[in-house]
Image (cartoon, helix red, strand yellow):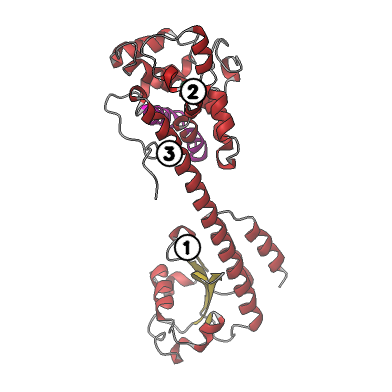
């Protein structure tokens, strides 16, 4: 069973990529010299995997249905189930299994289980009845199934934790926006504009997710700015403006302990940098400014101009577009201003993931 270390190594590397399970099942098929190998996780279909050899398609047309039928036919009172597996050595002599396929087959399935949680089944099907499933095969399959169950458990914990952090952070943004009528909805709109630009720029899913969080959180540091300054109905004095300018650093300090948001911090920290280097907090210039921050800057500027502020009325979208074009190359990245103009639409569709409503 020299394949075991190889498989075990791979199992460890899984986070929650279903495709790795597919590869494992392929490995199983090769090693065990069977005709079909599968993993079925009913509540998480993204983990489902099925592979089969060339000769199978003639025998069974609906492979997935066949596997489902096999699993459905496992008698729940079988004594072997207490040991978390089920074997059919000859389908023709096993009640409930003889009419599932036109040809005789044998079938082995083990439970994917960890800490009392049952996730699904992993198994093999062979149409060669001259051999039988051996004890060693059962042991290997059983051990793989257990490891996969561990990985699924860990992924669930990771997802729960991630969701918890995200909801916590959304509550934080919500709290800031609740303090100030004028900025209500600002974070959500900046997020929506940013994601529209990300799509146009062809950013992949991972990059888009990072941008999603940095854009929704870009002003989270305002939680540390006195309300009296935030809500001031006239233009700010110089020293008040200096205090406002601390918000990206404050946001960074608040969110830094959250590992899950690490990649989203630069976009947030630098959203007030200017393309010409005259911004804050670091005075970064041009493409030194992280792309996410440059995207957020465009979205943020546009939304600020079109929102009513305590000290001035809102401008129309047309006026705002003209204004951001005027500062392209000085305040904003000119390429991204162009992108914004291309994707900008008056009836903005709500972008998934920008809402401050809690995710379940
Ligand atoms: Fe800001």
Res. 37 mark:
none
Task: Label 3: state its secondary structure.
Answer: helix
Q: Position of residue 13 (x, y in %)?
A: 64, 55
Mark 1 lies on residue:
48
The N terminus sits in image quarter? bottom right
Q: Earlier in the sequence, mark 2 or mark 3?
A: 3
Q: Which residues are magenta?
A: 186-211
Q: Is residue 312 magenta?
A: no
Task: Label 1: state its secondary structure.
Answer: loop
Q: Position of residue 132 (x, y in %)?
A: 59, 85
Question: Can residue 54 be seen at all in this image of the molecule?
Answer: no
Q: Earlier in the sequence, mark 2 or mark 1?
A: 1
Q: Earlier in the sequence, mark 1 or mark 3?
A: 1
Question: Can residue 284 be seen at all in this image of the molecule?
Answer: yes
Within 8 Å: ligand 1 and the Cβ of disc 2? Answer: no
- What whole-number distance in Å separates the C-alpha atoms at marks 2 and 3? 17 Å
User: To which quarter of the image does residue 280 belong?
Assistant: top right
Taking the spot 43% from the left edge, 33% from the top edge, the residue there is: 173
Q: Of discs 2 and 1, which sits in the foreground?
A: 2
Res. 171 mark:
3
Task: Label 2: state its secondary structure.
Answer: loop
Mark 2 lies on residue:
225
- The answer to whether residue 188 is above or below residue 274 is below
| Nearer to the camera, 47 or 182 | 182
Q: Is residue 235 left or right of residue 253?
A: left
| Nearer to the camera, 273 or 124 | 273
């Amino acid at each position: 069973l020299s394949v075991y270390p190889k498989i075990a190594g791979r199992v460890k590397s899984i986070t929650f990529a279903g495709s790795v399970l597919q590869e494992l099942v392929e490995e199983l098929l090769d090693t065990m010299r069977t005709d079909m190998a599968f993993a079925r996780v009913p509540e998480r279909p993204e983990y489902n995997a099925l592979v089969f050899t060339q000769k199978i398609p003639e025998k069974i047309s609906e492979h997935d249905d066949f596997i489902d039928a096999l699993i459905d036919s496992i008698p729940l009172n079988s004594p072997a189930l207490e040991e978390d597996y089920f074997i059919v050595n000859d389908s023709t002599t096993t009640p409930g299994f003889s009419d599932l396929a036109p040809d005789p087959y044998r079938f082995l399935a083990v439970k994917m289980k960890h800490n009392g949680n049952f996730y699904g089944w992993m198994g093999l099907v062979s149409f060669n009845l001259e051999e039988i499933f051996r004890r060693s095969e059962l042991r290997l399959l059983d051990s793989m199934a257990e490891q996969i169950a561990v990985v699924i458990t860990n992924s669930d914990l990771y997802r729960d934790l991630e969701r918890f952090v995200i909801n916590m952070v959304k509550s934080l943004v919500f709290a800031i926006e609740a303090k100030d009528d004028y900025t209500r909805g600002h974070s959500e709109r900046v997020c929506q504009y940013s994601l529209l630009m990300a799509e146009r720029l062809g950013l992949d899913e991972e990059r888009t997710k990072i941008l999603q969080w940095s854009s929704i959180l870009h002003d989270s540091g305002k939680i540390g700015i006195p309300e009296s300054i935030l809500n001031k109905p006239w233009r700010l004095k110089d020293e008040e403006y200096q205090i406002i300018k601390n918000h990206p650093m404050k946001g960074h300090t608040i969110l830094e302990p959250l590992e899950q948001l690490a990649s989203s911090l630069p976009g947030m920290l630098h959203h007030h940098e200017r393309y010409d280097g005259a911004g804050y907090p670091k005075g970064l210039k041009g493409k030194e400014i992280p792309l996410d921050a440059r995207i957020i800057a465009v979205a943020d500027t546009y939304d600020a101009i079109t929102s009513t502020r305590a000290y001035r009325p809102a401008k129309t979208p047309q006026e705002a577009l003209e204004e951001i074009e005027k500062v392209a190359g000085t305040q904003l990245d000119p390429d991204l201003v162009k992108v914004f103009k291309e994707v900008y639409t008056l009836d903005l569709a709500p972008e998934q993931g920008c809402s401050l409503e809690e995710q379940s």
